[in-house]
Image (cartoon, rainbow, N blue to C red):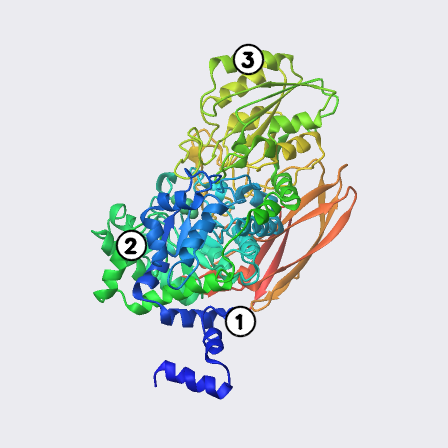
Amino acid sequence: MNSGIQKLILSASLLLPLNSLAASDSYLNANLSSDRRVDLLLQEMTLDEKIGQMCQFVGEASDIDFDSKDTKTDYTLALGARAGLIKEGKIGSFLKVSTFEEANILQGLAEESRLKIPLLIATDAIHGHGMYMDATTIYATQIGLAASFEPELAELMAEYTAREMRATGFHWAYSPNVEVVRDARWGRIGETFGEDPYLVTQMGNAMVRGYQGKDFSSPSNVIASAKHFVAGGIPYNGVNGAPADVSERTLHEIFFPPFIGSIDNGVYTIMPAHNEINGIPAHAHEGYLTDLIRGEWGFEGFYVSDWMDIQRLETAHKIVDSEKQADKVAVLAGMDVHMQGPGFFDNVKALVQEGEIPQSRIDDAVSKILYAKFQLGLFENRYTSQETVDTTLLKKAHRDLALKTAQKSIVLLKNSGVLPLKQGVERILVTGPNADHQALLGEWARVQPDSNVITVLEGINEQYASDSTIDHIAIARHDLISKAELSAVSKSAKKADVVIAVMGENSLRFDPNKTSAENVDRPTLDLVGNQIELLKNIKASGSTLIVVLVNGGPIASEWLTENADAIIEAWEPGMYGGRAIAETLVGKINPGGRLPITVPRSVGHLQSFYNYKPSAFHRGGFYLSSRKPLYYFGYGLSYTTFDYTDLTVPKTMATNDSLTMTIDIKNTGAKDGDEVVMIYLNDKVSTVTTPVRKLVAFKRIHLKRGEQKTLSFTIDNKDFALLDRHMKSIIEPGEFDIIIGDHLKVATVMVEK
Ligand code: BGC
């Protein structure tokens, strides 16, 4: 029986008029479940329309005058062939769309297509909606959020970012970046949560929840993308996208867990990495994309390629000899959406017609993409308005959170008693390339209106309104401080009581002079250019030298560590970073952040991380240099002190049980403050090697001076597991040390069968 007759009989039996039944049984009926709507829509789609959903293009509105009355005509002209493709249903999603007007125009064109399928509009909203053409809220970058050790902050940031995205017509964040860093030369560290798999996992999970809510069905949710799968943080030479030659064991122990966490938290898209992993490019890795991630880990969403990376299977990895073969290998491996451009459509269509790609693979990809569009409510509501934009961007709650992310991420690395600064300081010199620079915003942010950003200089001026003289010597470039600038600083430093030198990196996305970012990796980990020379001159002047670092990846400078009177690691603290830094300098904020990444002694000491295997240094160290890093993961000072007492850990634990332990923490100093309590495990003897310690729990708490709290932690039994010689996860009975913080307290538990 054909489906038309079936419908007729059904309608007669329900006594409903035919047209209302048609409406109710249509993919356009919002009362049906997203799954049902996907099934109905799929039945109506041609092969062209299906492959169209897998195709992503870039917007191109940058040169359009959105004030002109003819915006739509102008823009449609600029779109050229793409406008036609959208109307034919041959484009499913966009990235690099600049404004909400552009998003609306694109959606209007999609609504003219036969099936009216809305577009998914994606962006690199990494720490705020920073790629948007207009001013938005810019938070601290991920490395700073990780330093806060407060996943709740990351979750709220993602939630607020999603609101700003939806208000402007965007539905898909290429975030979180849950890569673990093992090579500090890599220029993308600011985008990551650092070196520890557990911390990265907790932060990534929080961001997925923040973006997607329960099931991304609310009008303020977006879909997230866990990226980049996998091991991009351990590339040859520290160079972005270079091969990862890494053992299967290390992949399982270090690099996979954050992705598993994101999947368990419902992440709907995953972006493979530019790299190859042990000889197989990520975008062609069927064993990972299909068997491991979908098959074993239960990923139900879809994959989006990274920028042009399917083409690169031919041009960079050379595993195929044509773009068509590249498309074939990628789609068969499991890739669903192609970022970006033409070519893919025709190739995939031909491959399906030739029987090289089964139709079922296409249906599988398209169903998942359509599910997101239904679930996000785009068929009902694809447009946005000026009013929504105006009432959502830069809301007070968002801006307050931006300040909080900066305050909470600051790590005090050194303090020879000079901080907090006294109010009565007569003359302060503020200098350095980051003193009055928007590098504070970090990677994936456009330059913002000056009135929306508080630089360090402005922050200090806020704190010392009238009673001190604040001098400023501007430094134009991070990598090249001129002779004139050097001598002006030396002169001014001699007159100052205190010099605040704001040094570091510049990773602003569109700055031609950036010193570290995507595709700008670091051949040195020291301060770039002649920044140290500037600091040496200041030191020679005899003034107190306080160094504030603004950077994504760790700055390794022995001279700095030994010679500065105080060092504040501010990371890339976002739009209000200057206020947070100044509040920390004067003690209104007591720094409570901790390092999410080890600061090595030099680039020659790489790889440098805290969770190394026990034999790492059993045969010695380096010529004329300590093997110890400048600062380990987890390090950070405070203006107060904390005492740890009464660690209670059960003497024994069964392998199928969890472990509950308590510890008392008291603020024993003179100021209120935050403490990050960290719990590490060490498996004392194991049949395969295990790290000297690994983080398994943490909590950041606030304690008033004199206040004491008892904290309780439950450690899951799977944290005691290792991968045996056959890569099977088992818990071996025996003794485990429970280590609190940096060996502040240690207890031993016997794990019994
Ligand atoms: C980056 C991704 C990003 C994409 C789109 C790529 O070069 O690796 O992280 O999401 O560009 O902008």
> Which comes before the other along the chain, label 3 or label 1?
1
Q: Position of residue 165 (x, y in %)?
A: 53, 49
Say left or right for 505 vs 740: left
Q: Which residue is mark 3?
A: 488
At 46% across and 54% down in the image, what residue appears? 225
CA–CA distance in space, label 2 to label 3: 57 Å
Give the amino acid type for the residue marked by disc 1 in the picture.
Answer: Asn
At 55% across and 31% down in the image, what residue appears? 549
- Position of the N terminus, as image quadrant, is bottom left
Q: Nearer the viewer, residue 101 or 163?
A: 101
Give the amino acid type for the residue marked by disc 2 in the picture.
Answer: Phe
SS of the residue under disc 1:
loop
Corner quadrant of residue 604? top left
CA–CA distance in space, label 3 to label 1: 70 Å
SS of the residue under disc 3:
helix
Q: Which residue is mark 1?
A: 31
Furthest toward the right, the residue is: 706
- Say above or below: 447 vs 693: above
- Position of the C terminus, as image quadrant, is bottom right
At 55% across and 23% down in the image, what residue appears? 432
> Which comes before the other along the chain, label 2 or label 3?
2
CA–CA distance in space, label 1 to label 2: 35 Å
Give the amino acid type for the residue marked by disc 3 in the picture.
Answer: Ala
The answer to whether residue 249 shows anywhere in this view is no
Q: Nearer the viewer, mark 3 or mark 1?
A: 1
Mark count? 3
SS of the residue under disc 2:
helix
Marks 1 and 3: in contact by CB < 8 Å? no
The answer to whether residue 397 shows anywhere in this view is yes
Q: Which labelled disc corresponds to residue 344? A: 2
> Which comes before the other along the chain, label 1 or label 2?
1
